[in-house]
Every structure is written in structure tokens, then in C-alpha cells.
Image (tube, rainbow, N blue to C red):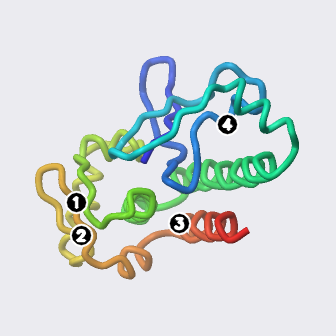
Amino acid sequence: MASLLSVTEDGAAVEVGMVGNEGMVGLPAILRINSSPYQVVVQLPAYAARLRADVLRAEFDRGRQLQDLLLRYMHVLLTQISQSAACNRFHTMRARLCRWLLVSRDCAQTDTLHLTHEFLSQMIGAPRTRITMAASGLQKAKLIRYNRGKIQILDRQGLESSSCECYRIVREDIKHFIAA
């Protein structure tokens, strides 16, 4: 799982998107942009393939299956970034944390996530104390269990019910992308 972080001049960061096995990082390369508007940080270990930008662009320019696939994936990523902005502005900390845990779970394909509250506060863009309070409520509701940097999802359906519509919108977009 890789996180796409928007970073301010003073070094503050917030996650605006996540990439799992459904996608890729480096889309600016096909747009002939040599820099990215976000920083990419690998959050959970995974296997990945690396490809030179010029090779990717050359294949993309052939205008076949890869071009179609990457343009559709760009739509998925834009949806995720848009929903992240709306979620951070309009939804409760509990709903935002549920969304983030569900997206992370989907990307990592595991119910056990090795993440600290400090890390979550940086990704969600909220003070650690608010993350701790929200996580505590989720644990009391028996939706998750956490202990020293390890979060285990106990009730995925319950998390989905506690999440905002942002998770469902992004998940549906990814499902359509994969099915096509």
C-alpha cells in the first residue's frame, strides 16, 4: 500500500489517496509531467514492479489497452482524491477513521494493519488525541482492536456502517474499474 501525501511548505502532510494492487504510482509521467503534486510513501510492505517513465510513455502513446487502462485508473484516483477532500472537510472523525481503515484494509488485503495513532493522525490530518478518541470508540463498539501499533479489524460490516459515503463511492469506482 502506498499513500499519496499532499505536503505543505512547512512540512505538514495529509493523505489524499491510496494505491494498492489495483493501481500504480507515477501517473504524472504519462502526462509528461516530471514532478508529482504529491509525495508517495509506502505504508505497508508489498511487491511492486518498476518501469522507466520513457518506456511507460512510449507504450501509453501507442493508444491501445494500456492507455485505456491508465486513463480509467486516473479517473479512479481523481475520485479518491476528490472524496478525500470532501471527507476531510465535512465528515466526523469517527467516519473518517472508518473510511481510512476500510480503504487501507482493501489495499493491504488484510484485517491486521501495523499502524500507530501518530501515523494515522498524519494520514488523516487530525490531532493524535482525536484519532485516539475515535479509535477508542471503535474498539468499545467491538469494530476494531488495537494495541501498540497494531489495529485489527473485527467487524468490517460495522466499520462500513460507521463510515461515510466516501468509502462506498471510492469502493464502487474501483469495482467498476476492475470489472471493465
Query: Disc 3 marks which residue?
Result: 167
User: 135 or 112, which is in the foreground?
Assistant: 112
Within 10 Å of disc 2 (Cα), the crowding (few <14, some 14-19, many 20+) is many
Query: For mark 2, what is the residue?
Result: 144
At mark 1, the secondary structure is strand
Q: CA distance from mark 2 to mark 4?
A: 34 Å
x and y percentages locating residue 6 in the rendered image: 53, 33
Mark 2 / mark 3, whichever is N-terminal: 2
Amino acid marked by disc 3: Tyr
Find disc 4 in the rendering and name its residue.
Answer: 27
The residue mark sitting in front, 1 or 4, is 4
Residue 41 figure quarter: top left
Image point 25% across, 41% down: which residue?
Answer: 118
Which one is closest to the eye, mark 2 or mark 4? Answer: 4
Q: Residue at x 37, y 74 (%)?
A: 159
Q: Quadrant of residue 113?
A: bottom left
Residue at image position (22%, 54%) is: 132
Of the numbered discs 3 and 4, the one sitting upstream in the chain is 4
**First in sequence: mark 3 vs mark 1:** 1
Residue wearing tag 1: 151
Q: CA distance from mark 3 to mark 4?
A: 22 Å
Q: Quadrant of the C terminus?
A: bottom right
84 left or right of 11 in image: right
Outermost residue, right direction?
63
Q: Earlier in the sequence, mark 1 or mark 4?
A: 4
**Foreground of the two, 102 or 107:** 107
Q: Position of residue 47 (x, y in %)?
A: 41, 45
